[in-house]
Image (spheres, grey):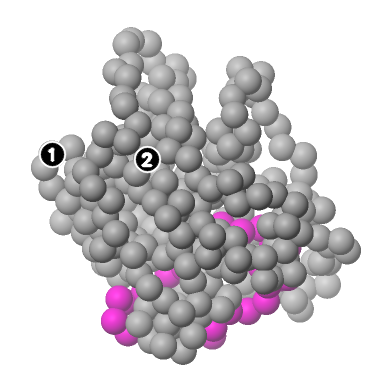
Amino acid sequence: MRRSGRVRRRTVGAVTPPHTDRWIRLDGTTNTRDLGGLPTTDGGRTVPGRILRSDNLQTLSDADVARLVEQIGLRQVVDLRTTAEILLEGRGPLRSHPDVTHRHFTLLPERGHHTDVFAVEEDEPGIELPAAGWAESLLPRQVAAHDEEEPPAVRSYLGYLGQRGDNVVAALRAIAEAGDSASLVHCAAGKDRTGVVCALALGVAGVPHEEIVADYALTAQIIDALVAKLAASPTYAQDMETRDVGSHTPRAETMDRVLTLLDERFGGPSGWLEAHGFGAAEQAALRARLRD
């Protein structure tokens, strides 16, 4: 569905000062922050303690777990990694906590149909770890003809929406149904797959385009530490070593372009969600998660 009409151009970077107080400093992560405290188009702000975003949770300390579960009230983890990533990285400390539910929605096309890896894990005979790396478990990405000239990162993000739109919607549906407790969305780095899901959630909550872009780009502040953390894991070491830090750094222009295309083609994030089966009632529930 394409909506015609003039789309107002926006200037990247024309935002309020960075919301650095939203960082959640943990021993075992480098890119955890709260989506609360962001301004909305009606003059309000998003509510803290409802939706968090983060990089991989495998190395959380006991103190980290206590802070997330007991202080912040974390009750749900939405994991956007592939089946192979989860199995290669192994069980993180939150996995055994009885008060935390884990949900899995990969945003990359992969071989097999293991949609509930947390239910089967390593005991499932049909799941085999890739021989040389988790990237071998992925299927080729499809790029729409009209998106072939877009920058690589933009193509990747549009690929999540185009090829795994079902799981983008499922992840947001899980968040919307979580009640007043905190949900945490993460992938490996907490910037790309996590960035797209969080951008849509913020769009539904009424956070303006420029602020969504600024939240996405905030990861650049800690990119050196993030790359170093991922490089220490055999699962991600090769990818970290073959690309420089600059290529891993999120750029405001990337998310700005993705949101602009959603504006042009669907009337914004809400229009994209509606076109993919996430209608008004569910959007209202998601909005309520971030707005009182």
Q: Nearer the viewer, residue 38 or 2?
A: 38
Residue name at image x 35 percent, y 82 percent: 67
Q: Give x and y (percent) for residue 219.
A: 44, 54
Local secondary structure at mark 1: loop
Residue position marked by numbered label 2 in the rendering? 213
Residue name at image x 26 percent, y 34 percent: 14
Q: Give x and y (percent) for residue 89.
A: 68, 72
- Taking the view exactly as shown, the residue that stands out farthest to the bottom is 62
Q: Sequence-wise, which precedes: disc 1 or disc 2?
A: 1
Residue name at image x 17 percent, y 51 percent: 45
Residue position marked by numbered label 1 in the rendering? 42
Residue name at image x 46 percent, y 60 percent: 222
Q: CA distance from mark 1 to mark 2?
A: 18 Å
Q: Give x and y (percent) for residue 234.
A: 74, 69
Q: Nearer the viewer, mark 1 or mark 2?
A: 2
Q: Is residue 249 visible?
A: yes
Q: Nearer the viewer, residue 228 or 292?
A: 228
What's the magenta region? 70-99
- Image quadrant in which you'd find residue 269: top left
Q: Give x and y (percent) for residue 179.
A: 30, 65
The disc labelled 2 sits on which kind of residue?
Val
